[in-house]
């Protein structure tokens, strides 16, 4: 649908602004306030003769009050959403767009980077535009009210587009891969785009550093553009050609690496609690492992042996998505000890949200030196019991009375040779006063031996000291915010907790996104709800409750459903038919779960017993019931599906009136409170059998299952209905 078809025509030429008050993304533009006033005037002129709310119009109208400058109080309407056609007269490039706001200076239009590229407004033109804008800002220069022909100009026309139902996208590069294309496209289109233009390039940010570019190849309804607001859009992603499809398949498939390849670390992989993994890691590289399962009631111990190898561990959950790295991990051992252990207790993890545990090995530095390692994960109880020292005091070593301890090397030497040993040892050896290690004088080991002046760390090489100082005593800055950490450990704690750039899996858009927010001044909503700043914002979108049809914010769905559960807990059971083979309620259950309260048989079971005669004491009714029971036991119903225990067809017994009467006598005597056993149709019998079988699971009562299968004949639909309307039996 175009502006001409609705009767609302509007076209104007604007200069491209060098800057806008607010950042524009996607296909958004910003126009002057006068543009809105002109649209309102033209819309009010049309009046009721050409209303945009006519039957069959896809675009509802948006009521708007006239501006103060117009001096009118008339009720004015504009179509929603407003879509425009932009044309660059220099090269005839065209693109459809939506409106962000009306806040630009007169005769200027603000364009997003996407639109600047689509209209092929070159970088040189943008720089020239900025210079001329700065010049015109000086006093005495030409008025801004006129169109400057030396600046890039864009023709803007109101063009209302039909709501799209289908789009075909073709990736411009091979290797595009995403875990959730649906959520990625939904988020990008919802946040950034109002329209899609056929033949243009759609760019989508998949992550912090990854951008996907797609060619818009086909649209339905067929045309040059579609509107993507408030519509269900079917999307197909197809390769440009077969060669690109093969390249994409090769890129996204994992490639096995050769462990014998030089300067390539081991590949890592899955771990289990009963297998030890060995490998090598080069400086500056990572070896990533994952522990997918373990006994959640027990903790684990991660043990690694390897000189200079760092041990890094992080949980994999909805609020922790990144692989552990030197500056981003939850648990870590970055010291120089050859054997490192990390103990994780069950209380350290939110077991309901933790899907797996990531384990990474890393060596600090940039030299091409391989370091061997051995990695093992053990249950906490098993490892504690196996490593528990015996409860026996160790006897001190008793030295011979004919020996003395050397003051230099601290060894016990026979007294007869002590003088010779001390002279030799003093000339050749030296002891470290801090760690009591003995070294040869003038040896490289002694010259490179070091102790940290800030903590108790020590090592044997100057390279270790440099790495230690860089990790523990060098200030680091967060790459995603303005936080300054005193060392790498503090930076890692920041990036895995309150950093706005920390990756999470949003429970509303189902994408890995930064959690956002201000770590120093969190909002009250994030503190109360426990959601991240991104989830608070994304959860503000609304949806319709399937139970009460109310419009609810996504972040309030859980609490809203708890209200329904509380209401369901106070509901009484549906009054079902007293026929034990029937699957109907007395008055039928309504769609919203309201139940009847009358007693007796349903209309279908009571119909054959009805008699239009005066029977105040119920004697005639009793004889009819007795006659029906006798007919069932003696002749049967003849239906092969019958499961009625008081029917010849089901019991496979030959009975006479004399033998059948004692069987039905207890039933006749207890008509007021007892059950009935009448044959029913096949559909009713199958539904009753299914209800009995499902009620045996003791999740929902039998009466609720009968009501659910009456309202929703399909088992899955009945289960959904029960979750929404019925109280659970436990």
Image (tube, rainbow, N blue to C red):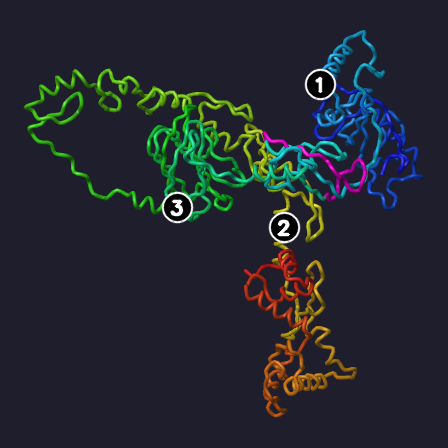
Tag shown at residue 640: none
Label located before the other in sequence (2 or 3) = 3
Q: Check residue 228 for magenta coloring.
A: yes
- Which residue has dot 3 on it? 273
Q: For mark 2, give the secondary structure.
A: helix
- Is residue 313 at least partly visible in the picture? no
Camera-side mark, 1 or 3: 1
Return the x and y of residue 659 as percentages of the image width and height: 59, 90
The magenta-colored residue range is 208-233
Q: Describe residue 358's horizontal placement relative to residue 402 as left or right.
A: right
Q: Position of residue 239 (x, y in %)?
A: 66, 39
- Are the two marked residues, 1 and 2, in contact with CB atoms closer than 8 angstroms? no
| 382, above or below 26, in the image | below
Q: Nearer the viewer, residue 240 or 197?
A: 240
Quadrant hosting residue 593: bottom right
Cβ–Cβ under 8 Å for marks 2 and 3: no
The image quarter in which residue 632 lies: bottom right
- Say whether residue 463 is visible: yes
Is disc 3 placed on a helix, strand or loop?
A: loop
Checking the image for residue 561, the label placed there is 2
Q: Nearer the viewer, mark 1 or mark 2?
A: 1
Of the pair 645 and 321, the residue shown nearer to us? 321
* Residue that carries the numbered disc 1 in the rendered image: 123
Q: CA distance from mark 1 to mark 3?
A: 58 Å
């Amino acid at each position: 649908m175009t502006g001409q078809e609705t009767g609302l025509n509007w076209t104007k030429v604007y200069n491209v602004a060098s800057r806008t008050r607010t950042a524009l993304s996607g296909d958004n533009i910003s126009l002057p306030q006068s543009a809105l006033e002109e649209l309102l005037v033209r819309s009010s002129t049309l009046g009721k003769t050409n209303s945009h709310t006519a039957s069959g119009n896809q675009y509802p109208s948006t009521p708007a009050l006239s501006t103060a400058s117009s001096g009118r109080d008339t009720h004015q309407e504009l179509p929603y959403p407003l879509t425009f056609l932009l044309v660059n007269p220099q090269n005839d490039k065209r693109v459809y767009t939506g409106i962000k706001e009306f806040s630009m200076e007169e005769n200027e239009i603000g364009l997003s980077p996407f639109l600047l590229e689509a209209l092929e407004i070159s970088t040189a033109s943008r720089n020239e535009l900025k210079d001329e804008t700065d010049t015109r800002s000086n006093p005495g220069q030409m008025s801004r009210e006129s169109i400057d022909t030396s600046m890039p100009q864009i023709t803007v026309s109101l063009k209302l587009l039909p709501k799209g139902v289908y789009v075909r996208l073709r990736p411009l590069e091979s290797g595009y891969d995403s875990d959730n294309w649906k959520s990625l496209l939904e988020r990008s289109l919802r946040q950034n785009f109002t329209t899609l233009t056929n033949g243009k390039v759609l760019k989508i940010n998949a992550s912090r550093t990854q951008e996907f570019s797609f060619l818009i190849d086909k649209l339905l309804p067929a045309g040059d553009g579609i509107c993507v607001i408030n519509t269900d859009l079917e999307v197909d992603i197809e390769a440009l050609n077969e060669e690109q499809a093969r390249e994409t398949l090769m890129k996204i498939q994992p490639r096995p690496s050769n462990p014998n390849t030089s300067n390539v670390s081991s590949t890592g992989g899955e771990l289990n609690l009963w297998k030890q993994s060995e490998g090598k890691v080069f400086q500056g590289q990572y070896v990533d492992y994952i522990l997918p399962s373990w006994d959640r009631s027990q903790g684990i111990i991660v043990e690694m042996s390897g000189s200079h190898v760092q041990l890094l561990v992080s949980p994999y959950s909805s609020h922790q998505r990144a692989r552990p790295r030197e500056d981003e991990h939850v648990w870590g051992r970055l010291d120089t000890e050859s054997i490192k252990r990390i103990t994780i207790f069950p209380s350290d993890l939110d077991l309901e949200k933790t899907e797996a545990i990531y384990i990474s090995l890393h060596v600090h530095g940039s030299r091409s030196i391989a370091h061997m390692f051995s990695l093992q994960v053990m249950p906490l109880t098993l490892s504690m019991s196996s490593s528990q020292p015996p409860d026996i005091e160790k006897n001190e070593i008793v030295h011979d009375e004919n020996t003395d301890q050397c003051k230099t090397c601290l060894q016990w030497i026979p007294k007869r040779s002590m003088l010779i040993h001390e002279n030799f040892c003093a000339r050749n050896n030296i002891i470290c006063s801090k760690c009591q290690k003995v070294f040869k004088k003038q040896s490289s080991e002694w010259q490179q031996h070091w102790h940290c002046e800030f903590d108790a760390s020590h090592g044997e090489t100057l390279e270790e000291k440099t790495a230690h100082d860089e990790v523990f005593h060098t200030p680091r800055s967060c790459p995603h915010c303005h936080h300054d950490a005193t060392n790498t450990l503090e930076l890692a704690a920041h990036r895995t907790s309150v950093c706005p750039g920390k990756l999470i899996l949003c429970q509303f858009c189902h994408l890995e996104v930064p959690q956002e927010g201000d770590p120093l001044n969190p909002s009250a909503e994030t503190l109360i709800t426990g959601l991240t700043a991104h989830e608070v914002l994304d959860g503000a979108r609304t949806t319709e409750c399937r139970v009460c049809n109310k419009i609810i914010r996504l972040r309030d769905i859980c609490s809203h459903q708890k209200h329904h559960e509380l209401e369901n807990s106070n509901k009484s059971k549906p009054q079902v038919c007293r026929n034990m083979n029937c699957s109907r309620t007395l008055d039928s259950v309504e769609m919203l779960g309201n139940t009847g309260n009358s007693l007796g048989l349903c209309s279908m079971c009571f119909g054959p017993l009805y008699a239009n005669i005066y029977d105040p004491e119920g004697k005639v009714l009793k004889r009819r019931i007795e006659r029906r029971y006798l007919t069932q036991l003696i002749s049967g119903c003849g239906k092969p599906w019958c499961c009625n225990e008081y029917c010849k067809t089901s019991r496979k017994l030959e009975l006479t009136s004399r033998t059948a009467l004692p069987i039905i006598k207890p039933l006749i005597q207890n008509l007021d409170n007892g059950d009935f056993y009448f044959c029913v149709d096949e559909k009713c019998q199958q539904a009753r059998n299914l209800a009995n079988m499902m009620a045996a699971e003791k999740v929902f009562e039998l009466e609720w299952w009968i009501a659910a299968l009456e309202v929703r004949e399909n088992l899955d639909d009945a289960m959904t209905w029960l979750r929404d309307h019925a109280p659970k039996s436990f």
